[in-house]
Amino acid sequence: MFPLRILITEDDHVSALLLKKALEKNNHEIIGISDSGERALEILETSPADIVMMDINLAGELDGIRTTEIINEKYDIPVVYLSASSDAETLTKVVGTNPSAYVIKPFNIRELNMVIELAIFKDRKEKELQKLNNELEEKVRQRTKDLAEANKELTRALEKEREIGELKSRIVLNVSHGFKTPLTSILSSAQLLQQYAEREHPFKAKIQKHAQKIENSVRSLNSLLTSVLFFGKADANKIDYKPKKMFLAAMLNEILDVVKAGSENDVKINTKFDNLPKTITSDSDLLYQIFENLLSNAVKYSKDGQEVEFKVWLEDGQLKASVKDQGIGIPEKEQSQLFDRFFRAKNVGIIEGSGLGLSIVKKSIEVLNGDITFQSAQGKGTTFLVSIPIQN
């Protein structure tokens, strides 16, 4: 065992000398012998010790137990009690001071050396554990501080993102609205050109052809702007359900007229409207978006000479509709992406489109608490089935 600096606190002078002699045989250095707690504390003030051998009954006002408590508070040095008493009351007091060991007098030197060695080992392990515990607590404090700072950064980033999102929405809405007015003027001018071309004019056919192109392009761009405006409101959480009473047949016929007017394909639309009430209560704008986009897509992705079936009926308080075409269909591997924004299947070829229509349909149906399903096979067409709760 390596040599230690030991303080002996023992009020029996003979016992103290015997103890000193036994410890010195093992190469330990005795830094002092005190017969009172007060004297032991004085020695420790000037001479650091590795361990203190402490008798419980001492001369002076401080007994061994109280002296040990002070040593624990000020010096954090391991203490080994020496006592001839082993009664329950004494042991209870001793345990309360967390001693490193307790030796009953009389003792033999071998036992004493073993106790001292275990006391030093215990003390070092406890200090190592305390050090690790302190380091862990410091890491926890630092990690908590880092997490708090990260949360602040995240909060600031989310706030910034919200501000940017609001700014983007305002820009989109303002720019889109700004385009709407000149587009309306261009569309009116194109329609006037077609009317003028109905009179005799050497370039009548060309005027009608180009005026029609202008009108179709304006309608296409206007539809795109409408889609952008829709998602600008969606991203700003400004799409609300606004129910009102409407004439259902009138709305459906208006949609048919718009789709036919904007169609560049020779596709026939077959309609079947069964058991429809004259009026219903729902959000007319959202219903318009749903049926117009589904029907426009069905016509656009069909070939000349093909037919589209548009059925609407009332069933169990639900407005139900199916739109079935014989067009290009949707590849099976891509069907899971069908309602994603800007998604367009690989088989659309040169057919123009923004990839926003079905996203608008899906969002509108969600706002109406409805449901949409579809079946499709590439080259064989697609069928959409819509179910929307309404009020009569």
Image: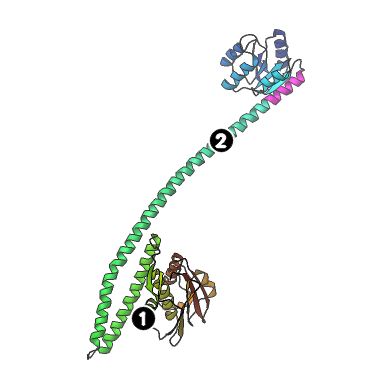
Locate residue 322 relative to residue 34 in the image: left or right. left
Q: Amino acid at mark 2?
A: Glu
Residue 354 visible in rendering: no
Residue at figure coordinates x 34%, y 57% from the top left:
167
Residue 135, disc: 2
> Residue 262: which quarter of the image?
bottom left
Q: Amino acid at mark 1?
A: Asp
Total marks placed:
2
Q: Where does the image place residue 186, in percent across and percent down from the top left?
A: 26, 76
In the foreground, 90 or 1: 90
Dot 1 or dot 2: first in sequence order is 2
Residue at the disc numbered 1: 257
Q: Where does the image place residue 214, in percent across and percent down from the top left?
A: 30, 79
- Magenta span: 107-119
Location of the N terminus (image quadrant): top right
Q: Is residue 213 above or below residue 32?
A: below
